[in-house]
Image (tube, grey):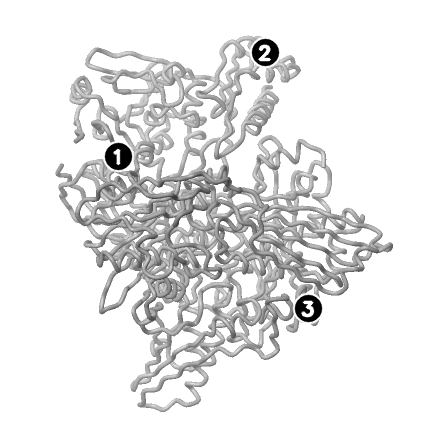
Amino acid sequence: MINHFVPKTLKEALDILSEHDCYIFAGGTDLMVQKHKSSGLLPAFDKDILYVMNLKELDYIKVDSQNNLHIGGISRFCELINSPLVPDIFKTVFLEIASPNIRNTATLVGNIANASPAGDSIVPLNLFNASVVLQSKRGTRTVLVQDFIQGVKKIDREKDELITEVIVPPADLKFYYKKVGSRKAETITKVSLMGGYKVEGGKVKDLRICFGSISTKVVKNHWIEEKYTGISTNELRARIDDIINEYDHEIRPITDQRSTKEYRTVVAKNLLRDFLRQVK
Amino acid sequence: MKKFDTSVTKVDNEEKMAGLAIFTGDIRMDNAYFAINVRSEKAHAKLKGIEVPKLPKNYYFISAKDIVKENVVNIIASDWPVFADKKVNYIGETIGLIIGPDKEKCIDLSKQVKGIYEDLEPVFDMRNSYVHKEFTKGDVSLFKDAAKVFSEEFTTGYQEQIYLEPQAMLMYLENDQIVVKASMQCPFYIHKAICRTLGVTEDKVRVIQPAVGGAFGGKEHYPSLMAAQLATAIVKIKKPIKMFFDRREDITYTTKRHPSKTEISAYMDKKDNIIGVKIHVGIDGGAYIGCSMVVLSRALIAATNTYTFPNVAISGDAYCTNKVPSAAFRGFGSPQSIFAMELFINHLADYLKVDRMALRMKYLVKTNDVTSTSGIFRDPIILEPLIEKAMEMSDYKRKVKLYSKPGSLRGIGLSMFLHGCGFTGSGESDLIKAKLRIKKDKNGIVTFYTSQVDFGQGNRTTLKRIVVDTLGIPEDHVIYGAPDTNETLSTGPTAASRTIIIVGGLAAKAAQHLKAIWKDGEEQEIVEPYVGPSYIKWDEATMQGDAYPGYAWGVNVVEVSVNPITYEATVEGCWSTYDVGHAIDERILLGQADGGLAQALGWAYLEKEVAEDGMFKQKALADYAIPTSMDLPPMETEIIDNPFKYGAFGAKGAGELTFVGGAPAFALALEQAIKHKVHNIPATPEYIMELMNHED
Amino acid sequence: MKISFTINNNKVTLDVDPSMRLLDVIRNELHLTGTKEGCGEGECGACTVLVKGEPVNSCLTPIINVADRDVMTIEGLRETKEYRIIADAFADRGGSQCGFCTPGMILVTYALLKKNPHPSEEEIRFALSGNLCRCTGYQAIIDAVKVASEKGIKL
């Protein structure tokens, strides 16, 4: 028999987590598929479940005095899409995640914690150097999303910790985003690219590049980004092939039921080229 | 928006919209046991035994050893066993059922059943033919004198029906009968399958049709397998049993459209006139033939499509592979061979350096031309107006020129096609022998019965309307319900685009006869047998003669753009014209037109189903992508009236026709957009990338 | 666990496993069979219900997540005058063929028009993009939403 915990307060939730190893159940749109057994049967959960959607304390979207966006742990995609506080580029990404019905249920934190290589929200979070806040009875810590996700389904979370918040620092950038799936809606990403850049006085002041779905986690290479920051936009465009080649060893997609290694590789590079051409 | 002056309110509209329609899964039967399939894990192996765990009380394992009379599912070839016996031939073949009152317990027990196998070499590619057919027209010895020969090969992939309601069946005992309620297309197929495997008389089985959530061919034969399995169980267990598939089980183990490989050669004389064509169509039938020989027939008969060539050699094979058997799916073989011919004739024009449309028009079929099987196209063919109209609607002539420029990344494609309505040859009069029962009570209320299932096509509405209009009595004086084999005589399966042309015609005739003998205040009943047009002569052995009682025609124009960065294709526009004889209900007909084309476009570029070592890689709706509302553009369709003298109110068939032309129109548009020839579908972005990054 | 929620304006309290799918509660416990199961994995939208007015897939929603919330199924919607307008529009355009996706489509249409009484064709296609239909090619459904919108559901 497993226990079902439905805490009403964060404190209650953290108390439970300090004593029980639980699935953290938010919107459930990933868990209910993963644990689905058959029509009419209960999902096949093999350990205790902590349901968090009643934690009103985690239901917020706000901006602090440094313009950091704080997203509460149970904020759903539909709420983020409708919030005036959320940057447009996030909305662009969110509007292409799953389907309207799923976006009315699924949470941002759930998408992060699911740690799928095809998780779309993780791409802009990486690009913005966003962090997650984890709380436990032992205390609070903040981890960059890039570090929090360690691999396929692997996250840096202790059993007693709950992700209570996502913090997105501001970024004064121009953006490029393209998600490639197998159809125009309700589709799992084959490959995606988000680019961000800032140009001042003809020079590239900031350059950020994130690939989704082409490796075990989002590819963002700080070293390459730095290398091409500070040069003029003309030089950047002249060196597009060099930049693409820099990513050769980073683009390591697989062949699966949705696409091929070859396709993902070529399209990832095409997208990068398309993005870099727009840096003006 | 168009006003539907010719349409009446669909009889099942309200119940379906309000959620009142009762589908099989909606029938409440709390005491029913659950049946869970135990499936082969091997593609090809001797089944040396089955280890069954000790079963708790009220739990059963039903397998080949429980067969009452014949271990055969009554699907045309009769080669598919109800339960695998001594041998398994595909991954997923049922070796037995676990049946009991608790579903979860059944699933757990089913996982403990172990087949003991001795591996045999499986075959997954098309090399072992189990059905071969061939025929010729004219003098094919002339091919050897050809000055030029042009040959190409085309392939098409699997397609899964994705009816929104998965397979579902409920069986129980009542009044000394086995009663079946299921999601089905053909009540009498199920009926016969049960009678045959149990060896019981017809009166011992009753099949009742609840609401059916889509079928598209996928519920033509597969429910017969489920019924034979459950019938074997119910005579032993004597409890109600239900077998409901979850979507994954449905995608992974039920029948699909046959993958195909078509080779075509054209033989030209010195002046580039076509002497004739040679066509070979291969279809992947899977582990059992089932209905594959009939699918192959249709593919072969349709292989010259809308073109008349003086000399033709056509052959084909259905191949046995260790995979899930392929079976019926809207179009039934003809979409595969017509896809090949439509592309081939365009490629041939390029090879001969002549205008594509000019070559097609030169060989365009005309009224009274000889068909590929040496029959005659007797009824007026209005292809030219259909083509003209479709060109006008789509601005084809301007666009085809515009998009021919290098780097256009946009293309427009036009397909023309035909579909033979009804069963092949004399099948209607010799095999189906439909009989329609119509009766009238003392108060003048008329009830008529058919075995036609309305799984969305609107035939409950249209058939009723045929009777109402023929009798000239108020609509509420005519009763027409869903089939129930206790009441209904077989008017045949709901398949082959035969419902309106054949059964509609029969219903009209029955109503006319009733009208002729109508006596107020009396009970009257008529059983009207189908009588085919006398001119139909068909020899199945030689594939010679008139293959179908009538043909429906169509033209599709599809416009496509391609993203050069991601190689994704977007359908930008669709325009269609059809000759379905006379459209009795335009709204219903447009529903078929839009739906058929949408499904065809899915097959053309989105829906990829690949088997690897005998197992499908795409097992869920998340991986098998059918079109969403965002993937399709607005569709425009025009119907041109051309009444057919043997159909009810001039109607021919329409259900399958609307599927046939989508893929070639798409592929032709794609070719123009990317300036490379297409030979295979689905044309996924992965394939388009290959084409764009390689020279032809 | 005892869980209370409102279904079609009626408050119910059930003693069920909190992880039970809302879909199974609706169909098997409450015997409201207008909500259909087409895939059980959140892909097809046949099991769409409204939770606090928003369409969700009931196959992915555990019953605990609707505790103390309002759920509406087609059985509730069909009692409203807005339903009549939408249903008439579907009938007019031929928006329902096999009918298995139809209750879900109608619920999504209702939710859309309530938020956005005059959606563009693109907005309609977007709103319906999680509800699969294999019969109509969507055109008739989209036209039906337009007709319902023109009829001016004052929502």
Q: Give neighbour class at mark 2: few <14, some 14-19, many 20+ (Cα, 10 Å).
A: some
Identify the residue position indicated by label 3 in the image.
B374
At 31% from the left edge and 72% from the top edge, which residue is drawn? Answer: B203
Q: Chain of mark 1?
A: A
Identify the residue position indicated by label 1 in the image.
A44
Q: What is the C-alpha distance between the residues marked 1 and 3?
A: 61 Å
- Residue A261 position within the rendered picture, expressed as x and y whole percent measured from the top left: 54, 27
Question: Does mark 1 fall on the same chain as mark 2?
Answer: yes
Q: Chain of mark 2?
A: A
Q: What is the C-alpha distance between the residues marked 2 and 3?
A: 75 Å
Viewer-proximal residue, B242 or B559? B242
Viewer-proximal residue, B482 or B45? B45
Indicate the amino acid at tag 3. Ser
Badge number at residue A203: 2
Q: Report whether residue B57 is seen.
A: yes
Q: Give neighbour class at mark 3: few <14, some 14-19, many 20+ (Cα, 10 Å).
A: some
Badge number at residue B63: none
Residue extending furthest toward the right: B270
* Secondary structure category for the residue under label 3: loop
In the displayed structure, would residue A169 be above or below residue B674?
A: above
Q: Give neighbour class at mark 1: few <14, some 14-19, many 20+ (Cα, 10 Å).
A: some
- Residue A242 position within the rendered picture, expressed as x and y whole percent measured from the top left: 63, 14
